[in-house]
Image (tube, rainbow, N blue to C red):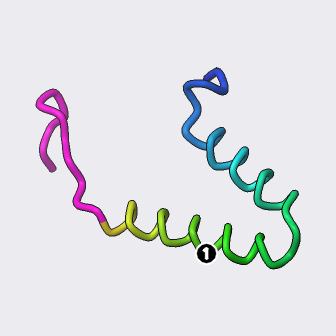
Amino acid sequence: MSTPSNDPSAGFVSRVRVIEEQPLESRAAGYAGLHDELAKRLDAPVTRSASEPAE
């Protein structure tokens, strides 16, 4: 089982918690920023390490 420090979703969950604790106006901006960051990650090209086989 992975520890929170090794779990990539742990950072996401903590960021959502911080956003949820903010006033409504700030939450909208926080979620918009999170959306933009996630969209950039999804649109980024996939890079493989030398040890990963090509498909």
Side of 18 relative to 44 (left or right): right
Q: Quadrant of residue 25?
A: bottom right
Q: Horizontal placement of 28 versus 55: left or right?
A: right
Displayed quadrant of residue 35: bottom right
Q: Helix, strand, or loop for circle 1? A: helix
Apparent side of residue 19 relative to residue 5 in the rendered image (left or right):
right
Viewer-proximal residue among 54 and 35 = 35
For mark 1, what is the residue?
A: 32
Vertically, is 37 above or below 7?
Answer: below
Which residue is pictured at 39% across the width and 60% down the height? 41
Q: Which residues are magenta?
A: 44-55
On the image, the x and y values in percent for residue 30 come to 67, 67
Residue at 12 percent of width and 45 percent of height: 54
Locate residue 14 relative to residue 2 in the image: left or right: right
Q: Could you tell me residue 8's position as x and y percent?
A: 55, 39
User: Is 50 within the magenta?
Assistant: yes
Q: Is 48 one of the magenta-colored residues? A: yes
Q: Quadrant of the N terminus?
A: top right
- Comparing 26 with 31, the one in front is 26
Give me the residue at 38% from left, 67% from top. Answer: 40
The prevailing secondary structure element of the residues shown in magenta is loop
Residue 43 against residue 45 in the figure, above or below: below
Amino acid carrying mark 1 in the image: Ala
Q: Quadrant of residue 9?
A: top right
Residue at x 58% of width, y 32% of height = 7
Nearest to the observer: residue 6 or residue 19: 19
